[in-house]
Every structure is written in C-alpha cells, then in structure tokens.
Amino acid sequence: MFKRLLPTHDSIKQSRLLSWLGPRIHDPSLWHLNRRAVARGVAIGAFFGLMVPVAQIPAAAVMSIFLRANLWIAAVSTLISNPFTYAPIYYFAYRLGASLIGAPLPRGEANLSHDVVASGLVQQVGELWTWITGIGQPLVLGMLLMALTGATIGYWGVRFFWRVRVLSKRRRMRNARARALQSAH
C-alpha cells in the first residue's frame, strides 16, 4: 500500500534537489520498507517529534540518513507532535520533569503588567526570565524522557508488529498449502 506512494529509485537518483547529498541519499535503506529501516525511522521520528519543538522533519531526515533509517517514515513519524498536540505534550512533559526533580508546579502566569516604562521593562524581562527558567529544566527533562520512551516504544513496537505480521502470513500460507494437499488426495 505504501510502496506506491514512495518515489522510485530512479526518480531519486535523477532529482537535482537531492544531488547535493551525494551517494549517501541512494542508500536503499532510506527508501525501502523493511522492518529494520522502518523501525529505525519510527524511533527517529518519535524522538524528534517529542524532543525538538522546531525543525523536526529536517532533523529526523538528517538523522535517518546517518542511521540508515527509512526517510519517509522518519519524517511522517515526527507528526506525533502537531499544533493539536503541542499543549498536552508540553504540559505532560513539564509535569513529568517537575515530579522527577521535585520542582514546584507554577502558580499562575508570570507577573507582568501592561504599562511599560523603561525601568519597568527591565524588571518585567527579569521576571519573565525567572518564570521561563523555572519551567525550562523540568520541561526539557520531561521532553527528553518522553522522547526516549517514545523512540524505544516505537522501535520495538514496529519490530513486534512486523514479526507478528510475518508469522501470520507464514501460518496462512502453510495452512493454504496443507488444504491444497488434502484436497489433492
């Protein structure tokens, strides 16, 4: 099903947009659907989708080239985080990180007033910086743990489901052959 959506090897070789990547871009693992490359692609996509808030797809694409993962799967897997899921992901990441390092949960928003004067601006920037750095450490820790967990679950989940699918297909073929032999006798 997915194979017809993927570009052909010849179209990739002849693409002027990809020529700057050299021979590395022609590695078959980047384009074929096999269990190792797909599992690595899902793991890379989940990691960058949960860890990096910007440039997720380019980061996943570059890493998939170096780790010989399926490029398309890595790019699509980053969409685990999107405008609809950012808030719950970051909220949960902060709560996770805060609970692990024992940081207090923030009580409301930064105390910023709307009338700005020169001396008040410096104070407000200072208060904003204090508020951001207060949530930054727990947020980054939570995001890192979620990214590592998501990558691990994604990698082993794909390997498991791929194996189950292969075994199921073999079982069906074996049963079909057995039925064919029985009907022949």
Image (cartoon, rainbow, N blue to C red):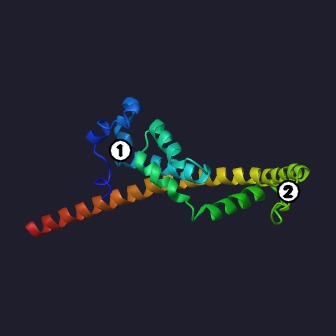
* Residue at far left of view: 185
Residue in view at x 60 percent, y 49 percent: 52
Looking at numbered disc 1 in the image, what kind of residue is underneath it?
Trp
Q: Give coordinates of residue 79: x percent, y percent.
A: 51, 57
Query: With 37 as the anchor, is 105 left or right in this view?
Result: right
Q: Nearer the viewer, residue 79 or 164?
A: 79
**Label disc, if present, on residue 116 of the rendered structure:** 2
Residue in view at x 64 percent, y 65 percent: 88
Q: Is residue 185 visible?
A: no
15, above or below 118, in the image:
above
**Label disc, if present, on residue 31 of the rendered structure:** 1
Q: Nearer the viewer, residue 175 or 132?
A: 132
- Of label 2 and label 1, which has the lower sequence position? 1
* Residue at far bottom of view: 183
Q: Pointer 2: residues within 10 angstroms few (<14), some, or many (20+)?
A: few
Query: With 35 as the anchor, is 79 left or right in this view?
Result: right
Query: With 123 as the anchor, is 175 left or right in this view?
Result: left
Q: Nearer the viewer, residue 123 or 36?
A: 123
Residue in view at x 83 percent, y 50 percent: 125
* Residue at far right of view: 119
The quarter of the picture where the N terminus appears is bottom left
174, above or below 42, in the image:
below
Q: Give coordinates of residue 96: x percent, y percent.
A: 71, 59
SS for callout 2: loop
Q: Pointer 1: residues within 10 angstroms few (<14), some, or many (20+)?
A: many
Classify residue 184 by image quadrant: bottom left
